[in-house]
Image (cartoon, rainbow, N blue to C red):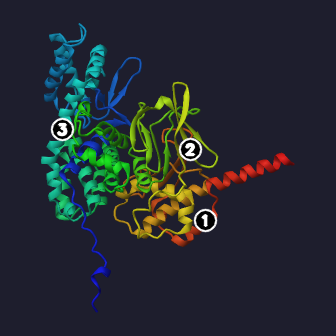
Amino acid sequence: MNVPADQVAPAAAAPRPLTDAELRAVAYFAIGVGSEGSIGGRDVSTRLSFAGNRDADTGRMSPVGNSGYSIGTLQTDLGQHPEVIPSLLNAYQAWAATQPAGTALSAAERRQTAADLARNGDTIDAQNGRPMDARIERNLNTFLRSDAGVTYIHDRDAAQVEELMTGTLAQVRQTALFRNSTPDDQIRLAAMVAKVENQSGDRWAPGLLRDMNNGTHDSVADVNQAIGRMLRANGDYMESGRDATLAGAEVVVALRNADARSPLHTAWQGVLADPLANPSQLGQDATRPNQRAEYTTIKELFLQKEQAPAFIDALDRGAGYAYGRPQAEGRNRATGGLYAQGDDFVLWNRDGPGRAYLDGQWSEVARNDLSRVRNRDGTTDLNLARDGNVSQLLHVDPRAPGLRASLDVDAPVAPERADHPLLRQARDQGRGLDAQLGAVSGDARACLDLNVACLAAQHRFDRIDHVMLGRSPPGQEPNVLVVQGDLGDPGRRIASMPLADALRGRSEELQQRLSAAPSPQSEQQEQQQSQRAARSM
């Protein structure tokens, strides 16, 4: 039977292959900003970093592993690469010549500083943790934060990315596993292997590449687990670095797949036009007036990589999302923040600077000028105070219908799933688990979201802020952890269940259990009604 041409279903679009610009963005943003060059959501690329602890009174250094000082977004370990130190000190001296007298290093100071920077962890231990001269360290950090220092760091970062592109990432692209994977999984694979190479040189990456090509590793989960087995006896820094990089990779995946109508899609495309732009020279191109705003916005998403996928998803749908405290609340410190409603958003980093995109216009904001009001109906108001006046930037309602339909138009959504806020939060916060779970069926993945939501409801959580896998000994199944509150907050609430149990169940039964559980809003309304009834007696 012949079918009219206008009634033939169109063929599915072929997956878009990863571009060189996207792989450079994986290296710089997922590995660099999201893992190597940040600590706890703070950018540490433009300061001397030290992998270890320091005594607050004496400055005595206690290294972790054999690392010493490092610099940059992709963190060049100066103890492992002392050949970098002369160029660093040359750049410092050129900058110091423009500064007050006494800033430049004398010949003796330069020799001692070079020796101090070249120490690895073993040498630091052998010297009883002796810190370098505090004045010189402060001056070096002042230089690294200057335009001259940012340019020096950027040039090193760009060279490091290109080295990965022509070396490890070129080899990753040739493996059988990469060629047979979806673009999303290619991003995850590229990020993991390049991270291993950047962190440990040729010690582990060649073996991963070999096994990705000979069939030993035939999934993201296999590579993930192989990295998890590295250096177990000496700590888990390879595993923790992998986890941070994978979280950054999920941000790349979310941005790459963002709805074309989302303002973040435009920002991401702007960054991809020059993913290795010099941060100190942003905004100098008159043809790209929004370059600085777009670049700093995208960078902030990788500093808040755990929350970013849910934030990106909300803007894909034109819906609401609220995360972060602009001001301290009780014992809880201020945090970075991501707020969205419709096509508008506001975000800021842990150090305070931020951006707003409201009614199609970019502007700068500062965390100190912001405050939030969490209303009883579950909405949040984000307010701005300037010159004694307070105005509302955003009114966020996570349950309000989005401006756009879900990107997955073929996925049926049962009414129970659409109505209960804990399920939406479970799905949003659990996106970062996909790479760690590896190949699981769609039914098992749906059960995981439902079980997480049911677990939160069972423990009477008001909301779900994090979903993650707990650490487990080799050979043992991890637990799924559901968290209400910030991870660093001593008052956070945590519930857990075995991963194997979370992946099992009948969707219909789980949906019925969740539907029978009160939503946070309805429970609050019941409490308010009881209080009113008690007052009227």
Query: Residue 158: which disc?
Result: 3
Q: Quadrant of residue 73?
A: top left
Reading the image, the residue beneath label 2 is: 380
Q: Are marks 1 and 3 in contact (CB under 8 Å)?
A: no
Q: Nearer the viewer, residue 125 or 120?
A: 120
Q: Position of residue 325 (x, y in %)?
A: 51, 37
Amino acid residing under circle 3: Ala
Reading the image, the residue beneath label 1 is: 515
Q: Nearer the viewer, residue 519 or 375?
A: 375
Amino acid residing under circle 2: Thr
Front: mark 2 or 3: 2
Tell me the residue at 30%/18% (across/down). 138
Q: Position of residue 520 (x, y in %)?
A: 62, 53
Q: Residue furthest right?
A: 537
**Residues at marks 1 and 3, CA–CA distance in whole angstroms:** 52 Å
Q: Nearer the viewer, residue 263 or 249?
A: 263
Along the horizontal axis of the image, is 443 left or right of 151?
Answer: right
Residue 66 shows up from this direction: no
Is residue 460 placed above or below 98 in the rendered structure?
below
Is residue 169 placed above or below 408 in the rendered structure?
above
